[in-house]
Image (cartoon, helix red, strand yellow):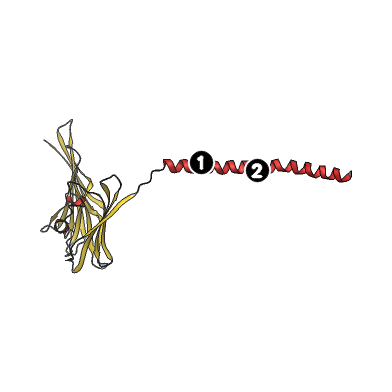
């Protein structure tokens, strides 16, 4: 009789524990399924951009600042889009002397932003110039994105003779860059609509160092038919002289 009682107690305890195990399993399975469903839903809504192709073209070797180098243009295009990421590099063997990233197209009116019609020889002729009058050739590279009604924008890459690389110089970059070899100046001109424009003139010494910068702002005051002109002279980026002048138009 005692044996039957012991067996009954054991079975009762076993039946009491099993639902808990089953319950835990169900809960764990539900949590796991919920996580999988969440991941699956995320994967469906996530936009994945697939690289369609990477195109590369290089120029013939040429010499600049006594360095033999060549251009390498890489165009990464994405599926269903004629625009992509462009990387223009000036190379000397495995060393990169200049790196310029830009938006490229397979069919753009600007040849400098058109991979198919990019002409390295014309680009080099149009872009190389001694911008800071230190005796070394530099590059001014046109960028379509900031260009527009303000003018054509150029990034200035200045040659570093110690490192033998071309370094981006934002201070010398600007709109409508123009070099005056006689006065040793680098000028930029930008406009904002009909009534406002600014002219920057950077003066250099004989070794390519900036002596001072002149800024001239012109603004048309519609209510008075006057032009407000503000002149500033800067040395080491500090204003040392200011002059205002208004005249009737």
Q: Secondary structure at mark 2?
A: helix
Question: Is residue 127 placed above or below 64 in the rendered structure?
Answer: above
Q: Nearer the viewer, residue 23 or 121?
A: 23
Please give the name of the residue rendered at 20% of the width and 54% of the height, measured from the top-left corner. 141
> How many angstroms separate mark 2 from mark 1 (CA)?
20 Å
Q: Nearer the viewer, residue 151 or 120?
A: 120
Q: Residue shown at 50%/41% (left/top)?
A: 38
Question: Dot 1, crowdedness within 10 Å: few (<14), some or many (≥20)?
Answer: few
Q: Is residue 35 left or right of residue 180?
A: right
* Residue 216 position in % (x across, y down): 18, 46
Mark 2, other Cα within 10 Å: few <14 / some 14–19 / many ≥20: few
Q: Could you tell me which quadrant the N terminus lies in?
A: top right
* Viewer-side residue, 11 vs 171: 11
Whole-percent x, y for residue 89 in the image: 25, 59
In the picture as drawn, the residue positioned furthest to the top comes out as: 223
Residue 42 in the image: state x and y as whole percent: 45, 42
Question: Quadrant where the C terminus lies?
Answer: top left
The secondary element bearing badge 1 is classed as helix
Q: Residue furthest right?
A: 1
Residue 21: name its quadrant: top right
Instruction: Say whether disc 2 or disc 1 marks the residue closer to the N-terminus.
Output: 2
**Pointer 2 residue:** 24
Residue that label 1 marks: 37
- On the image, which quarter does residue 128 sit in? bottom left
- Disc number at residue 28? none
Residue 107 or residue 126, whichever sits in front: 107
Position in image of residue 168 (x %, y %): 26, 57
Q: Is residue 137 visible?
A: yes
Note whether residue 217 is visible.
Answer: no
Whether 99 is drawn above or below 224: the answer is below
Q: Residue at x 21, y 63 (%)?
A: 70
């Amino acid at each position: 009789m005692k044996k039957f009682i012991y067996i009954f107690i054991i079975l009762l305890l076993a039946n009491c524990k099993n639902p808990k195990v089953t319950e835990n399993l169900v809960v764990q399975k539900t949590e796991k399924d919920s996580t999988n469903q969440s991941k699956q839903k995320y994967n469906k809504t996530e936009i994945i951009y697939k690289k369609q192709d990477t195109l590369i073209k290089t120029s013939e070797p040429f010499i600049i600042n006594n360095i033999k180098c060549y251009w390498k243009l890489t165009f990464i295009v994405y599926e269903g889009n004629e625009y992509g990421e462009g990387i223009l590099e000036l190379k000397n063997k495995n060393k990169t002397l200049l790196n310029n990233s830009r938006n490229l197209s397979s069919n753009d009116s600007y040849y400098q932003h058109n991979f198919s019609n990019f002409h390295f020889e014309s680009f080099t002729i149009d872009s190389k110039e001694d911008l800071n009058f230190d005796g070394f050739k530099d590059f001014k590279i046109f960028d379509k994105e900031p260009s527009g009604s303000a003018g054509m924008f150029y990034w200035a890459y200045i040659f570093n003779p110690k490192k033998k690389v071309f370094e981006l110089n934002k201070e010398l970059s600007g709109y409508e860059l123009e070099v005056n070899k006689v006065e040793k100046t680098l000028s930029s001109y930008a406009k904002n609509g009909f009534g406002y424009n600014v002219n920057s003139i950077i003066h250099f010494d004989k070794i390519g160092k900036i002596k001072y910068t002149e800024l001239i702002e012109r603004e048309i005051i519609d209510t008075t038919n006057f032009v407000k002109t503000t002149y500033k002279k800067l040395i080491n980026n500090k204003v040392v002289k200011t002059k205002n002048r208004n005249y009737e138009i």
